[in-house]
Amino acid sequence: MFDDYKYKKALNEINRQAQGFKRQRMVHNLTTARKILIVFTLNSQEVLDSVLNLVKYFESLNITVHALGYYPQKEVPQVFTMHPGITIFSKAETNWYGKPLSSDVEAFINKEYDILIDVDFDEVVPVRWISTFSKAKFKLGSQNYLNNPFDLILTVDKLKGLPYLCEQVKQVLFKLNNRFADEPHQA
């Protein structure tokens, strides 16, 4: 019952603050994007591996990538903190209803990214705060909930897993507004 109250309090606060929130919106793809932020909930090594593969893919295209992960426990295991370009914050760095309080998170929210990619299948309040209040110009996510902050929603079967979602993200961002997407490459 208390968790339900915290969730409702968080949603009310997000919706209240989002009313005055403004950002510059612009559709970006893998040709036009220069900076990408990936947000995720880190609850297993498989999630981290999928995010690392996505980061490597975007970096191979000369795109600057940062990944911001939420670890839903009080202390982040050291094994998750050893990857450059990935910042992890924990439940200890949120208030009682899930709002991130970390200065690192605040810096990510205030930085203007071309694309924000939320790779969570389930709504997690701290990640929703970041997705809602990020100043990213184009936001992409796989969740469809009331007042979601996304400009584009990918509907992917949760049973296919995160690696499949990451592949879909790559394909959609490659083909989006790209008139050469379906043409064969000439050598």
Image: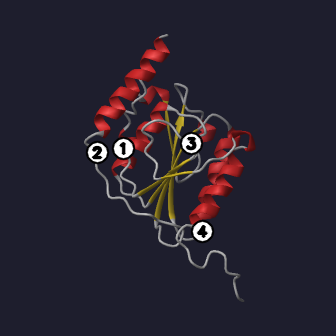
Q: Nearer the viewer, mark 2 or mark 1?
A: 2
Q: Earlier in the sequence, mark 3 or mark 1?
A: 3
> What is the three-letter code of the residue carrying label 3?
Thr
Q: Are marks 2 and 1 in contact (CB under 8 Å)?
A: yes
Counting other residues with Cα less than 10 Å from the Cα at mark 1, is it few (<14), some (14-19), or many (20 or more)?
some
Instruction: Tell me which residue sits at (40%, 48%) in the image.
Output: 108
Q: CA distance from mark 3 to mark 1?
A: 24 Å
Q: CA distance from mark 4 to mark 1?
A: 27 Å
Q: Nearer the viewer, residue 124 or 75?
A: 124
**Location of mark 4 (residue):** 175
Q: CA distance from mark 2 to mark 1?
A: 7 Å
Q: CA distance from mark 4 to mark 3?
A: 33 Å
State whether residue 151 appears in this view. Answer: yes
Q: Earlier in the sequence, mark 2 or mark 1?
A: 2
Could you say whether the residue bearing mark 4 is in a helix, strand or loop? helix
> What is the three-letter code of the residue carrying label 1?
Phe
Q: Looking at the image, is 34 positioned above or below residue 102?
A: below
Q: CA distance from mark 3 to mark 2?
A: 31 Å
Which label was assigned to residue 133?
A: 1
Task: Give how far across and how far down residue 172 sits, in percent.
Answer: 60, 61
Which label was assigned to residue 21?
A: 2
**Location of mark 3 (residue):** 81
Q: Is residue 174 found left or right of 11 in the rendered image? A: right
